[in-house]
Image (spheres, grey):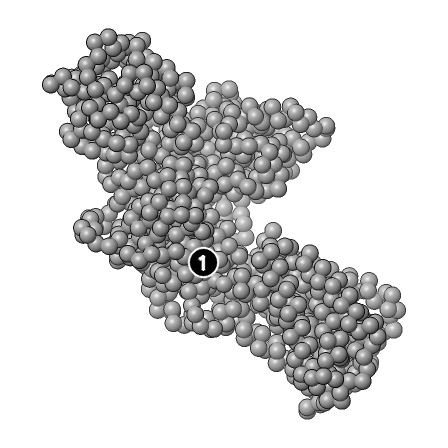
Amino acid sequence: MSAGSDVQVTTRSPGRFNVVKLLATQIELRMLLVVLVVMGVLSLISPYFLTVNNLLNVMDQSVVVGMVALGQTLVILIGGIDLSVGSLAGVTGIVLGLSFPQFGLYGGILACLAAGAFAGLVNGAIITWGRVAPFVVTLGMMSVGRSLAYVLSGANSISNLPPGLGQLSGDSLAGIPVDFYCLIAVYALCWWFLTYAKGGRTLYALGSNAEAARVAGLGIVRWGILAYVISGLMSAVAAVFLASRILSIDPIGGQGLELDAIAAVVIGGASLFGGRGSIIGTLFGVFVMVFIRNGLNLLNVSPYWQGSAIGSIIIAAVLVERLLSGARGRR
Amino acid sequence: MALLALTDIWKRFGATQALANVDFALEAGEVHALLGANGAGKSTLSRIISGHLRPDRGSILLDGVALRHAGAREAIQSGIAMVTQETSLAPDLSVLENIMLPRIAMPGRLRWRRMRAEAAALVAELGQGAGLDLDVPVRALSIGQRQLVEILKALALDSRIIIFDEPTAPLSPHESERLFEIMRRLVARGRGLIFVSHRMEEIFTVADRVTVLREGKLVQGGLPTKGRRQGELVQLMVGRDLQDIYERATPRTPPPAGATPILRVRNLCCPPLARDVSFTVHAGEILGLAGLVGAGRSETLETIFGLRRAKSGTVELAGERFAARTPREAIRAGIGLVPEDRRGQGIVPDFSVRENLLLAHLGARAGFGLGYASRNEAVRALLALLELPERRLLDANMLNFSGGMQQKIILARWLVLSPRLLLLDEPTRGVDIGTRSSIYALLRRIAAQGVACVVVSSDFEELIGLADRITVLSDGVSVTELPSELVDIEKLGMFAAPRTSAERTHTVLEELVARHGGIAYWIAVENERVFCFDRAGDDPVADPGFTAGGFPPLAETMIAHALRAPGDAPAARLIAAPDGSRPTLLVPIRGRRGHSFGIVGLTLPAAAPGFDAAGVSAGIAAALSEAQIAHEPDARLPA
């Protein structure tokens, strides 16, 4: 009755520090490397890239995508997808703009966040209780959200926003914009949640094997819905920062945001089958996305070509990721 | 010349040498078993033969011609099919489409009508005509039924070589026997069958020769099974002597009379499969739930555990009404469930062993954090108990371990919580014999610590060896409850007979009563005990002294006189008690492979002078034969 023969683990060479193996097992390190390489290449190509102004600009741009990508990460971790984030950022932005006159700055922000969370709740409830594919539900919500944004705003942009809103992204601390601190703070919080909180581990378990998680008594329904609620909420957060940056709210705001967010998550190493991914990876994925967009602008690449470039980079990144982790991969 | 000859086969996966210098030869017209513990390389070898894998080195000769298949499709074309261990069916396609899938992949027009007719014939040949609808999607089938489709798929190819990779694992003994019959039939037509298994009794039942692998090396090639003992093969397979795997460390102690059972299930109904289930389990007791696939065993466990809602019936936990609405409630009440489908319901593949071990802890936990640290002690103690090496275990991926090890970890997941009731659904499926014995020992230890265990298994030998008592389910109804030392595999099988065959015997009994009066019954007699599987009629004067599901000592029945009548077998005549009461006719029944299927009896209220005992006996035998219960009238009976 010895257990020795039961164990069939491929032996690892112990003790030795092995860069390749470390990179192969640690997605975060791999992503950091990618970010540094992208930065290096861009700074070689364009002398303007590594200037303070440009970096501040890049930080600003990463906030909106980053906020949305955080929610998207949770949804993708449970094996779902949220296509509605861009539209929700649009409609919650309109809610923000319309509620300032009545509720003031903070009341308006609160109403905006509540609207985002509510839309996420609707998504999550229909997906979880109604057992409808996430793709379908959030695709529908994407259409509804954009439509409501036009209806509520009368297809006009809102520009007389309270001055306090601009401080969110205008102010800076030690040379770094406040909104970027916010981004890092929510990512740190999310990392802690995913690593050390029961709910975070439940999301991973749910995405990896929902049935096993259910048998083990994990609250998969509750947490499954919550992932979409957070995603909706983060869309609203993104809408607030978007409005604060351009001090104008347009019903078309946030368009295409879902693609950038999903791309960032996927470049960050998350599996679209769920159960595998990391929030730090997503953050680096966001940087990669923003850097590349920024670089293409600096290089004066025609906007018509930028879509092709970004699309190719996304596919290439995922392909490389798949080859690197292929040995451990499934399906 | 061998039909198939493999010489000097080598195969390596990463750091693991899966096969080293292995030879294998298959003759036409034989069943050749591949035997080995999990990880011995038998699946690798069979996948090489089926073209799913390519050997690193070595030659494969089919009919003396070198075979170099580029893939499974070429292997199929050269007449080699495989019934795989993990089902390779397309879940959204219908049963028919799946059976004919290899043919659909071939070029040419599809002849659906002909394929349907062929598939129907194959299904009928397997004896599953009633249970398998050709038009339902495979997704809707149970594991056992899916396996049947796999087998049908290989049969549909009419291949010269068919590899059966643990085909019986999800099958009931009844279904297995049908499969073995079909395998014999295929062999008789000159095909060569490779049978991968680690179940000894099956190998002796069906295989002509056996090749034993251990850790990727050939231990014994082409050994005829005739005249061998199980122990020899186990020793070859494991490399050491294995003691009786069901050995009890401590003698079994009956629960004190009047003690409140940990679990009492009364008339539990959860349609469609579980219809009327009742049983009790005491602390420290292992209860077996026997029954065939589809008898409602898993559904019963899942209902208790809160994965399903009961339609009616009650569950009492330690004397109090209990109805779990979610698994979480059940877990918090001290219940654990080791599910049937380890991969689908047990393992979280992206989690380390440590997190998998602590998954139920996480589910039961109320707080916001993980609380893993609070279980460190428990985890360490468990690893010692399970004989798992801590160093390599905790951060390793679950899927790197053998099925047996995975199962131990899933089991340990519940032990972390110190449950009072543990429900285990097929705990040794796909687990090799060495690890099985350690799982049995572990379950005994758990029970000895006062945990009540309910074990579901299709392996009746396992239940008899492991359980203290056995409740038998047949088509969702608990038909009897027996102490395991009183019962054997045959009798469990007969109690568990599904409605379709039970109904046929019941009809025979009803007809006997209608025609001759008295009481008719289907029984088996062993070790001075009568086991009654079924009974018809209610004339108190003819009462034989037992009811359906009963197992009284022979001496306490009212027909001991007839059962003890002189002669080896009951004769075809009425035997009355000394006082002339209860004249009884007993007709022994034999199954297709010649073994006993018990006795059909008729007890009359009073002597019947014109009773044609021989005629009635022949009539019973003929009726049962027609109902496919017995093969033919017993040779010893006057026709």
> Closer to the camera, B299 or B157?
B299
Which residue is drawn at the image coordinates 37% and 39% (left, top)?
B477
The secondary structure type at the circle numbered 1 is loop
Residue under numbered circle 1: B326
Q: In the figure, is residue B515 to the left or right of B362?
A: left
The chain letter for the residue carrying disc 1 is B
In the rendering, at what x and y percent does residue B395 appear?
47, 64
Q: In the rendered view, would you say B13 is above or below B362? A: above
Q: Residues within 10 Å of mark 1 (few under 14, many from 20)?
A: many
Q: In the rendered view, would you say B189 is above or below B228? A: above
Which residue is drawn at the image coordinates 68% and 26% (left, top)?
B111
Quadrant of the drawing holding the C terminus of chain B = top left
Which residue is drawn at the image coordinates 75% and 87% (left, top)?
A162
Which residue is drawn at the image coordinates 29% and 57% (left, top)?
B318
In the rendering, at what x and y percent does residue B201 appear?
35, 33
> Closer to the camera, B291 or B101?
B291
Question: Picture quarter containing residue B582?
Answer: top left
Question: Picture quarter containing residue A194?
Answer: bottom right
Q: In the rendered view, would you say B162 is above or below A27? A: above
In the rendering, at what x and y percent does residue B342 appear?
46, 50
Q: In the figure, is residue A118 to the left or right of A299?
A: left
In the rendering, at what x and y percent does residue B165 appear?
49, 37
Q: In the figure, is residue B510 to the left or right of A148?
A: left
**Residue B30 appears in the figure:** no
Q: In the figure, is residue B270 to the left or right of B136?
A: left
